[in-house]
Image: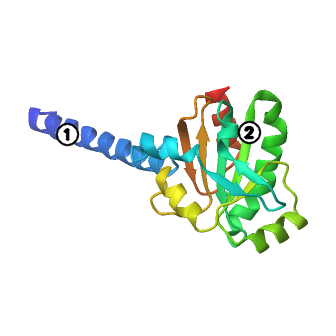
Amino acid sequence: MNRRTAIVAAVAAVAGAAGVGGAWWREHRRDGERPSAATAPTAVADFWTQRFDQPAGGELVLANFKGQALLLNFWATWCPPCVTEMPLLDRFHAEQRPRGWQVVGLAVDSPTPVRQFLARQPMGFPIGLAGLNGIELARSLGNPSGALPFSVVFDRSGQPVRTKLGSVHESDLADWVSALG
């Protein structure tokens, strides 16, 4: 192999590796393994001041969950993947709550459909009625598209450490538990 061929082969190998690395990084970011850099400290501080009505009455105060590992899930009754993942989140809550985890759902929906859904399929974790304001809250936490479902994992110090746009899977939950203990 002459020198020119070797140089072309080396450049092609580097370009290929860069392409594979770039594709992996984009996929990794799309799955939201880390919170967006756009998640400003003020957005996080504002998050912990939020309060929401609950479907069965009472108030959901997010500050009450600070100090725990928290899985926050934005969902809606009109979102098929959201509805599909609810039983998985409920099981996760039941299994991990003794280990210091909390799950909170914020319904980006009207109160009546949420109440009807929960009457048919009760959840063991708290649900807040965020309405359309939930989309803006999700955006402030790293979901620029406002699409659902969207989940954010907060560490025990109250900082977002993982996000996931799209359905949560068992493997996501296992990774999050492994990362936060």
User: Compared to 73, does 110 lie above or below?
Assistant: below
Q: Residue 43: where, in percent of width, then height?
A: 47, 47
Quarter occupied by residue 42:
top left
Q: Nearer the viewer, mark 2 or mark 1?
A: 2
Neighbour tally class for label 2: few under 14, some 14-19, many 20 plus, Cα within 10 Å: many
Q: Residue at x 54, y 35 (%)?
A: 159
Q: Picture coordinates of residue 119 (x, y %)?
A: 89, 66
Which disc is residue 21 wearing? none
Q: Could you tell me residue 98's position as x and y percent? A: 83, 30
Of residues 42 and 125, the one nearer the viewer is 42
Q: Are marks 2 and 1 in contact (CB under 8 Å)?
A: no
- From mark 2 to mark 1, how far is it between C-alphas? 49 Å
Would you say 150 lies left or right of 128 here?
Answer: left
Q: Amino acid at mark 1?
A: Val
Give the residue at the far top of this rendering. 181
Dot 2: element:
strand
State the scheme by which the image is colored. Answer: rainbow
Give the residue pinned by disc 2: 102
Q: Nearer the viewer, residue 23 or 66?
A: 66
Residue 47 position (above or below residue 2): below
Residue for point 68% across, 25% down: 181
* Number of other residues with Cα within 10 Å of mark 1, as a class: few under 14, some 14 to 19, many 20 or more: few
Instruction: Point out the image quarter for the N terminus.
Output: top left
Residue shown at 47% from the left, 63% from the top:
145
Name the residue type under label 2: Gln
The location of residue 20, given as percent across then percent down, is 37, 44
Q: Indicate left or right for 126 with 148 as reference.
A: right
Task: List the residue tagged with mark 1.
Answer: 11
Please tell me in which quadrant of the rendered image residue 10 appears: top left
Quadrant of res 180: top right
